[in-house]
Amino acid sequence: MKRALLAAALLASAAWPAQATGELSCGGEGVGIDLLVGHIDVLSISRAVITIGDQTWSSTPESYPGTPITVGQGFEDDRMLAVDFTDENVNEIIGRLRVVKAEEGDSRVAGGVFTFKGKGAFVVDCSEIQ
């Protein structure tokens, strides 16, 4: 079920061009990161859901069940995206997403690395954009 949600989110994702709001999803072997983002003058992340194996963390556990987390900080431009995730009380950074974006003509790709405390480091693909 989580894989189906991730696949659906990948198809609906929007990393660029900048839009008012959209979904950005990154996935790799055993990991999925789904972000609801707003693009105004700065990157605004309204929701983050992280799945590693059969465990889920969520910045909005009331609507997307999971262990509570907080989006610590984020930055995006036309070449990269960087987001840090903290524990619920913002005591420490527990996850980091670093994505590099490139485009040539009609081709667009985005990918990078995701690390999560106690769970490991993962290569992620964030290229599925619609």
Image (cartoon, rainbow, N blue to C red):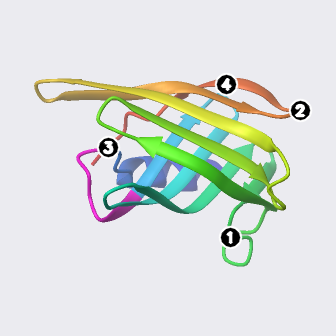
Residue reaching furthest bottom? 62
Q: Residue furthest right?
A: 118
Q: Which x, y percent locates residue 88? A: 82, 61
First in residue order: circle 3 vs circle 4 = 4
How far apart, in angstroms, are the residues tagged by discs 3 and 4? 20 Å
Q: Please give left or right for residue 50 compared with residue 127 in the image.
A: right
Q: Residue at x 68, y 70 (%)?
A: 60
Residue 1 visible within the image = no
Residue topped by disc 2: 118
Cα–Cα span, label 4 and label 1: 23 Å
**Residue 122 placed where, x, y %?**
67, 25
Q: Secondary structure at mark 3?
A: loop
Question: Which residue range is magenta in the image?
Answer: 16-22
Query: Majority secondary structure of the magenta segment?
Result: loop
Which of the image's four quarters has the N terminus? bottom right
Which is more toward the observer, 9 or 96?
Answer: 96
Q: Amino acid at mark 1?
A: Thr
SS label for mark 2:
loop
Q: CA distance from mark 2 to mark 3?
A: 30 Å
- Residue at image mark 3: 129
Residue named by callout 4? 122
User: Magenta span has 40?
Assistant: no
